[in-house]
Image (cartoon, grey):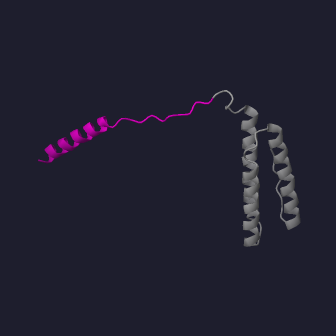
Amino acid sequence: MLRQSIRLQSTLNNNTLRSIKPTKLKRKKRSLEESVSFEDFVLKGQVLHVYRDILRSIYKVPDKSLREEVKFFIKGEFKATQNVTDLNTKRSLLIGGIRQWKSVCNNMGLSYTDIVF
């Protein structure tokens, strides 16, 4: 009796597994104009590195309300410039942002670790 139920279960499982067809993920093919250059790829990594370092250093701010305000400001600045497409503009924004963050750290008396990229 037990063997019959196990056989029945195994045949049900095999039939149901065979009837399920794997779905294919549809990937959007990029044209040459939409593809990302190597310089863009590297710069995006550098921007993410700087963004994460800044967010990590925000937690050194002792006052919680000031910390949240600075965090909100930093996220807003990065979101405001996320749609910039020119490579040189991206680089200058990144360098300017690092300089601004250094001055903010100096004004608040925080120790600043150099962001190397």
Work out whether residue 94 or residue 85 is closer to the camera in this orientation and state it.
85
Q: Which residue is most to the left?
A: 1
Q: Is residue 38 left or right of residue 95?
A: left
**Rendering coords of residue 108 (x, y %):** 85, 67
Picture layout, residue 2 above or below residue 101: above
Residue at 82%, 47% in the rendered image: 93
Residue 39 magenta-drawn? Answer: no
**Rendering coords of residue 50 (x, y %):** 76, 50
Q: Is residue 33 left or right of residue 4?
A: right
Q: Is residue 57 left or right of residue 2?
A: right
Work out whether residue 47 or residue 69 is closer to the camera in this orientation and state it.
69
Residue 15, quarter of picture? top left
**Rendering coords of residue 34 (x, y %):** 67, 32
Residue at 88%, 65% in the rendered image: 107
Residue 62, quarter of picture? bottom right
Q: Which residues are magenta?
A: 1-30
